[in-house]
Amino acid sequence: MKKRPFIIDCDTGTDDAIAIVAALGCEEMEIVGITSVNGNVPESYTSRNNLNLIEYLGYHIPVCHGAILPLLGSKATEASTAIHGKTGLGSTELPEAEHSDFDPRIAAQFIYEEAVKRNGELELLVTGPITNIAVCLCEHPDLPNYIRHLYFMGGSTVGGNVNTTAEFNIWVDPEALHVVLQSGIPMTMVGLNVSNQTEMRPSEETLLRSFGTRETNLVAELLVYMMNRSVGASKVFRANMHDPLALAAAVFPECMKYEEYFGDTECAGTYTRGHTAIDVFRRSGKEPNVRVAVEVDVDLFREWLCDRIRISGENGEAVRK
């Protein structure tokens, strides 16, 4: 099987970390690098989480620093102990990387150089604010010639989780998404309209622990934190897999249904800044520019995700020998 080269661009909090672990269990993927961005927590934490995670799992994958501010330079997000914990990984503390260091290139430079090097075959999985991709487009307008597809977790066809209309990743940097949506890069959006359905439950945590690998135990630990976090608001133990669902769109698309729409994002509204304006009724008369996930088979997705994490553990055990 010819592997598909991917860069994972992320603001590594809890479910981003789970997505990275699962990606290491996807035989279709060659992860050529991981780029970091301000989002769930400041970039100083997300980049360190990425470096620590990759070394802890035994891999040698380039990790790059990325944008520390949104595209227009507004305030960086502050750590939310109520969501991802102070450093982004909840109560999990990874060992500090001792044998790895950051790639000297910043995210936008790394993305462009790898895209050109791979002559149009590179794909992007973005699980945080899309700032790095927008910066790369501003510096290199020819980037769309070299990207095969972009998959991003963000937005929603309806509703939000920061306010009534905006999903967090887009709310952090709506201008960046506006730039990316106008670029012509083929892309798939996985929003809250589907990802809010993808909760993992205590039964999945128990299953993952039964495999007994470093990867499966780490994910189980993250799930426990996420489920305990959910109890305060919903009284139900569950952990939504927002970012792993974007990974599924890339390598297991059959677990979802999609529609082609025109989309943009609101950058100026007093109450609607960060809203993803997806033309689901096709009233704008504009040509579609994004494929949008509209339905998910939750059971099929859960089964696939647990299996990818299991395989990731098996792969990791072999890498660390």
Image (cartoon, rainbow, N blue to C red):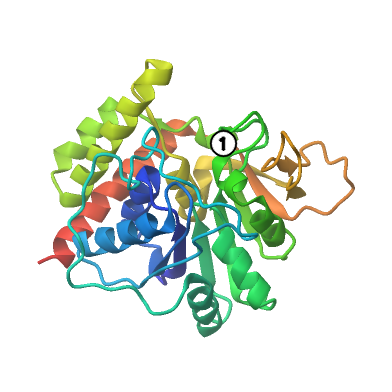
Q: Where is residue 255 in the image (x, y as percent from the top left)?
A: 50, 41
Q: Position of residue 115 (x, y in %)?
A: 54, 77
The extreme left residue here reads 321
Q: Looking at the image, which is closer to me, 277 or 184?
A: 277
Above or below 173: residue 113: below
Horizontal side, residue 200 vs residue 158: left or right: left
Task: State whether residue 252 appears in this view.
Answer: no
Q: Where is residue 193 in the image (x, y as percent from the top left)?
A: 59, 33
Above or below 320: residue 87: above
Q: Looking at the image, which is closer to me, 66 or 264?
A: 66
Quadrant of the drawing holding the C terminus:
bottom left
Name the residue located 74 percent from the left edge and 37 percent from the top edge: 270
The extreme top residue here reads 235
Name the residue located 15 percent from the left edge and 64 percent from the top edge: 318
State how many labels appear: 1
Horizontal side, residue 92 vs residue 73: left or right: left
Displayed quadrant of residue 154: top right
Mark 1 Cα shell of 10 Å, populated few (<14), some (14-19), many (≥20): many
Label 1 SS: helix
Above or below 167: residue 253: below
Displayed quadrant of residue 178: bottom right
Give the residue type that dot 1 points to.
Leu
Horizontal side, residue 90 vs residue 40: left or right: left
Q: Looking at the image, which is closer to me, 16 or 256?
A: 16
Name the residue located 38 percent from the left edge and 36 percent from the top edge: 302
Name the residue located 40 percent from the left edge and 49 percent from the top edge: 16
Q: Position of residue 188 (x, y in %)?
A: 61, 53
Read off the residue under disc 1.
Answer: 192
